[in-house]
Image (cartoon, coloured by chain):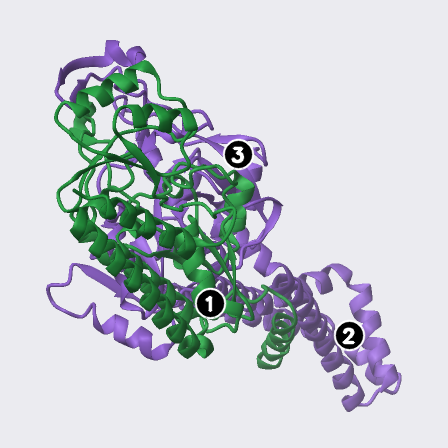
Chain colours: A green, B purple
Amino acid sequence: MRLATSLSLSLVIALLSCGGAGPEPTAPAVDEVLDRLLVYTVNYPLAYFAARLGGDHVEVVFPAPPGEDPAFWSPDPETIAAYQGADVILLNGAGYAKWVERATLPSSKLVDTSAGFEDRYIELTGTVTHSHGPEGDHEHGGWAFTTWLDLNLAVEQARSVADSLSSKIPTAAAEIEERFTSLETDLMALDARFAAAAETIGSEPLLFSHPVYQYFIHHYELNGHEIHWEPDVEPDGKMWSELAHIQDHNTARWMLWEGDPLETSVASLDERGISSVVFSPCANPPEEDDWMTVMTANAEALETIAATHR
Amino acid sequence: MTDVLFLAWRYLAHNRIKTVVLVGSIMLIVYLPVALRVLVTQSATELTSRAEATPLLVGAKGSPLELALSSLYFSADTPELTTHAEASRIASTGYAQAIPLYVRFKARSQPIVGTTLDYFDFRGLRFVEGRNMAMLGECVLGSRAAKILEAGVGGSVVSSPESVFDIAGVYPLKMQVVGVLEPTFTADDEAVFVDLKTAWIVQGLVHGHQDMAAPEAAPGVLAREGDTIIANASVVQFTEITPDNIDSFHFHGSVDDYPISAVIAVPHDQKSGTILMGRYEAPDEPMQILKPTTVIDDLLGTIFTVQNFVVAGMLLVGVAALATASLVFVLSLRLRQREIETMARIGGSKMRVAGVLVAEVAVVIGMSVFLAGILTVLTARFAPAVVRVLLLQ
């Protein structure tokens, strides 16, 4: 009996050691060595930061088509699949790129670059609150999201990008840190120009063509009023009426456009005593040069306004 | 020696029925306890391998067994729920990767598992067809779930209400199937995987409905007070997410306040795991952290205790059966007295005659053990499949 049992057990053990279930999958190695980090971003400023900080260590992809506003663009499933394949996905936060909420992205790869200053988000006013059913009131509102136009916040976002890249490529951490210092210096120099021009402008009212300048207006303490005009669309009669209504209590001499306005719009504004200047948020890649060049042009635009201050 | 074996064999062959009964009885006596042990060991291996591949589980305090069974096998009742903040908390420690799970709803008989894409990497799940979910309302089916729900890529599955009496509850959500997984012979084969956010839509926490400010929503508006619109229950909520209405789906409040059933914590190293566990040791800590292997080992301990009783019972039956078999041999010797005397008269020595009788017994036992061995080999060969089917059911 003992012999028989031993024999059977031996056979069983031999068989089990040969076949049976395959090995259970294990967690992916966290410290996996990556040759070239694939970084996807939701807007161009973050793509610029990542490319400048990562240098040759990263491949940066910002897949929104030219002409689409990345804040309101919705990628197709194939593009989302490409995002899923990235090593790092840089988010702007503050509700920027609403599609992120409705897409399935790997949480371990997401980096919310504005998470460090959530308490400084600017809440949008005039949002609709509604209630239905047992859950009670709720709002479909949100936050202003063009955070990088406050260059101090842009530095914090760049810091977040640098930290995430360094954690993924520890061997390049020193190089990334060096590049961050350089970027921070450039941003702070621009910030100083913005601040100096804004100080000269003081409380003089300014018109902004689009409601995306909240952080810029707030940080540089400008007396800005945002309307909703598209630079490539001829304003209609209602819009001119609204402008006339604004001019009843607002003596703005300058309109800051997010893109090159139509010549007819510029001429019509001139007739109303309002000059036009472009101050681009640069959420999309410019046709020429890069984000820093556009921001430098923005500083020059602001200095132009300051130079005419009465 | 050959002549002894020849005579023994001829005797057994002549008394075929008696031989078959003896061989069958002894074979079963040997086979049954061994087969039981093989099956139980295989079950334990299957259960343990899943637990071993899951380093740590975090959930609200309650039954550790429910938490483990729900998170590992998507079975048992839904454990006490926690919030997504717990996953954020674990991730923010930097000690572990946090993979949230929300196992609560079903599509017919199949569990809907709300999770993140990290789960697929963590379990090493691969696609036999289609792609991973990319948008709200998309789902990926385990191999058996696809068969049971009779759905494939391009098809759809519908979530089931938690209770048939919940007529005021949320509407079932029609989910588009975008991928089917390769079989893994684990609980993942049974699951309907969705993004956590889709699971919250199934629950009605995230929803899409008519634009309340739009003219077509006017019949559902009870009152407008400034920026506040109060609507009645007739507001049309969407039960399927399409490209046309996906933009209307929205969250209320912070995602961190939304429910999940557990978090799989994958520590970056052993030290990180130990530190993380230490963080849940405070007496006022409302969460529990557990090693699934510990819980499953406890469960297996119970199973093995029961198994030992069964094996002991079988051994007693076996001893009784062997005693009966021995009696059959002894009685057959008395019946064969004349045959034995004949062998002695034709020149067979006492040793030779005894040898023939011993050989008969040895051949019967040898054949029994041999057949028991074959059956055991077959059992071991097919035990994984049998156990997986039994466990999955």
Residues at marks 1 and 2 on the same chain: no
Look at the image and tell me in which quarter the N terminus of chain B lies. bottom right
Front residue of A87/A68: it is: A68
Q: Subunit of mark 1?
A: A
Residue A65 lies left or right of residue B80; in this view the side is: right
Residue B77 percent coordinates (x, y): 31, 46
| Amino acid at the residue labelled 3 | Leu
Q: Quadrant of residue A189?
A: bottom left
Whichever of callouts 2 and 3 sits on the residue coming sooner in the sequence is 3
Give the structural element (helix, strand or loop) at label 2: helix
Question: Which mark is in front, 1 or 2?
Answer: 1
Instruction: Report in which chain the residue with disc 3 lies.
Output: B
Q: What is the CA distance from the residue labelled 2 to the residue labelled 3?
A: 71 Å
Find disc 2 in the rendering and name its residue: B338
Mark 1 crowd level (few <14, some 14–19, many ≥20, 10 Å Cα): many
Amino acid type, callout 2: Arg
Residue drawn at the location 55% of the way across and 72% of the way down: B323
Same chain shared by disc 1 and disc 3: no
Q: How many marks?
A: 3
Nearer mark to the viewer, of 2 and 3: 3
From the viewer's perspective, is residue B17 above or below residue A123? Answer: below
Q: Is residue A197 above or below residue A10?
A: above
* Image location (x, y in percent) of residue B350: 77, 89
